[in-house]
Image: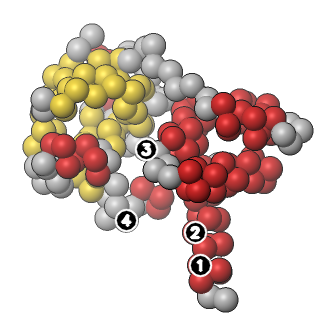
Amino acid sequence: MMVTLQAEIERFESNGEKTGWSYVFVPQEVANQIKPDNRREIRVKGFIDQLAVEGMCLMPVKSDGFILPLNKLIRQKLRKEAGATIGLQLEHHADFKIEMPDDLEICLMDEPGLLAQFLDRPKSHQNYFINWLNSAKTEPTRTKRLVMIVNAMAHQWDFGMMIREGREAGSREVGR
């Protein structure tokens, strides 16, 4: 069922790994119209203002409701930032899938147990890694990210831990 609502773009000033994120809040009552009685992530498609979107993730928050993160590219296309009001037309994207890239599968198969560990993660968590890998603009960046994902699986890190470790390793190299 397609639901329609108006929402203000907000920004987390201080909220752990979500600090700096821009998002809109979607009340639980509205989320129940998209996917009834659900408190887990919901993939949605539809429109933000006139911009067609698909595969976006409504994420549950501790208080009642969900947030829909709006990345920089989407905000640029909308020409809107925190404080602006946007129109949402959303419905459940039940058939949403992200395919595992061949190079990632090959790298994970190289080390015993890593592919199985990756596939044991919730699909939404696998998608964090896959989307990040696929967003690399150059081959050297993609290769570096493949190494980081394999290393994360070897250490049993989630996506956030992998990113934090990568930043810390980068700052240690700069300090040499």
Asked which secondary structure carries label 2, the reply is helix
Q: CA distance from mark 2 to mark 3?
A: 28 Å
Q: CA distance from mark 2 to mark 1?
A: 6 Å
Q: CA distance from mark 4 to mark 1?
A: 22 Å
Instruction: Identify the disc placed on residue 167.
Output: 2
Q: Which residue carries the number 4 mark? A: 14
Circles 3 and 1, Cβ within 8 Å, touching? The answer is no
Q: Residue 156: image x %, image y %?
A: 76, 49
Mark closer to the chain start, 4 or 1: 4
For badge 4, the amino acid type reads Ser
What crowding class fits label 3: few (fewer than 14 Cα within 10 Å), some (14-19), or many (20 or more)? few
Q: Is residue 175 above or below residue 82?
A: below
Mark closer to the chain start, 4 or 2: 4
Quick one: which residue is furthest to the right in this view? Answer: 112
Using the rendered image of the protein, determine whether residue 56 is visible from the camera's viewpoint: yes
Quick one: which residue is furthest to the bottom in this view? Answer: 176
Give the foreground label among 2 and 3.
2
For badge 1, the amino acid type reads Ser
Q: Which residue carries the number 3 mark? A: 62
Quadrant in which the C terminus is drawn: bottom right
Quick one: which residue is furthest to the top in this view? Answer: 1
Left or right relative to 64: residue 29: left
Going 45% across and 19% down the picture, which residue do you hit? Answer: 96
Circles 4 and 2, Cβ within 8 Å, touching? The answer is no
Q: CA distance from mark 4 to mark 3?
A: 15 Å
Left or right relative to 50: residue 123: right
Instruction: Identify the disc placed on residue 171.
Output: 1
Mark closer to the chain start, 3 or 1: 3
Give the foreground label among 4 and 1.
1
